[in-house]
Amino acid sequence: MKYIVQISRVFVGVLFIISGFIKLNDPLGFSYKLQEYFGEDVLNLEFLIPYALLISVFVVVFEVVLGVFLLIGYKPKFTVYSLLAMIVFFTFLTFYSAYFDKVKDCGCFGDALKLTPWESFTKDIILLVLILILVYGLKYIKPIFTKLPTTVLALLSFIVSLWFGYHVLMHLPAIDFRAYAIGKNLQKQMEIPEDAAKPVLEYTWTFKVNGEEEKFVTSGSYPEVDGEYIGVDTETIDEGYIPPIQDFSIESNDEDLTSYFLEKENLIMVAMYNISKAEADGVVKLKYFSDEAIKKGYTVIGLTSSGEEAKQNLKQEYNLNFDFYLCDEKVVKTIVRSNPGVVLLEKGTVTNKAHWNDMEDIEL
């Protein structure tokens, strides 16, 4: 039993640290996922949405710290029961999400590793079993150092985690796992290769045969049945290849200009998913940055999900000399974790990007 507990201890501790660090690298992205869970279509806890970022930072810091606590043996009883409470909550959340098909990606490992809700639920069940082993074998979990260094390490893990979370919020994620990372070509990220796996669909046809309803399952072809057709239900068995970028677009009121702008050299996209929520200090910096960029021959455009009136009011209030185009809010949030944020492209390839706090550091 002692060895099983130690193996569980290492596995759980390392996994919590990895999972927590990936989310701590992008707490804003995790807060967006929490907002999705809090929405009326999932848990219907909309009153928590304004606090999603605060909850996000607390959860991911706590996750990393508990992993460290477990490995070094700091306050074993508190650590193990905290891990149990956390995994019970996440197991419920992933089961609810999977069973009712509410959230397609659980967000457990951020953008680094996409898990379906059922995959995430399975992972949580395994962790739950391992943590129950830790509860049962609590007496075998001992500190690996003496009291002082163990306490110092525990405190350092909390301080470093909190600092790192604050740092990436004030700048950008230290590691960008998204399809809009520096070096990525957006056109290629949107392409579907000719040899890509195709979606697999299953059709359940209903016919009335000899006065009774009968069902026939096919992979797509219309069944040859001597009866009266009533209806058909379609189920996706395998979604096939899904390109990393699916919903990106740059649209005016009249046309889709995505291809036009992605072929441009020296393009700067200003990401502002919601104009009313943009940081005022950031927009002030943006005015100077965009003016300098235009002087040096850059094409500057804005991307937002906000309406025409909000766009015009912002341009007039800050005397901005570039136009905003329509893009889905979730996509703009994904492009850059800043409101506003800037992305530099060369014929569709991302060459640089920055939080509004760091716009002055970009060399034009």
Image (spheres, helix red, strand yellow):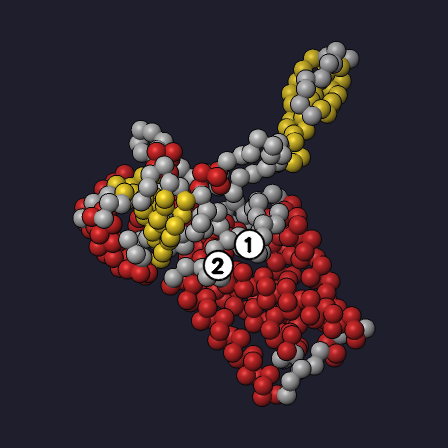
CA separation in Å, label 2 and label 1: 9 Å
Question: Residue at label 2?
Answer: 175
Residue 53 circle label: none
Q: Residue at x 45, y 59 (%)?
A: 173
User: In this orientation, which residue lies closer to the viewer: 39 or 324?
Assistant: 324
Question: Is residue 1 found left or right of 357 in the rendered image?
Answer: right
Question: Residue at label 1?
Answer: 112
Question: Is residue 158 found left or right of 283 in the rendered image?
Answer: right
Q: Which secondary structure lies at badge 1?
A: loop
Q: Residue at x 69, y 70 (%)?
A: 10
On screen, residue 175 above or below 115 = below
| Residue 160 image offset from top left, x and y in percent | 49, 73
Q: Which secondary structure lies at badge 2?
A: loop
Q: Quadrant of the N terminus?
A: bottom right
- If you read the primary sequence from the N terminus, does the residue marked by circle 2 or circle 1 appear first? 1
- Mark 1 and mark 2 in contact (Cβ < 8 Å)? yes
User: In this orientation, which residue lies closer to the viewer: 49 or 47?
Assistant: 49
Q: Report the amino acid beneath label 2.
A: Ile
Q: Could one spot residue 330 in this view of the protein?
A: no
Question: Is residue 334 found left or right of 220 in the rendered image?
Answer: left
Q: Report the amino acid beneath label 1.
A: Ala
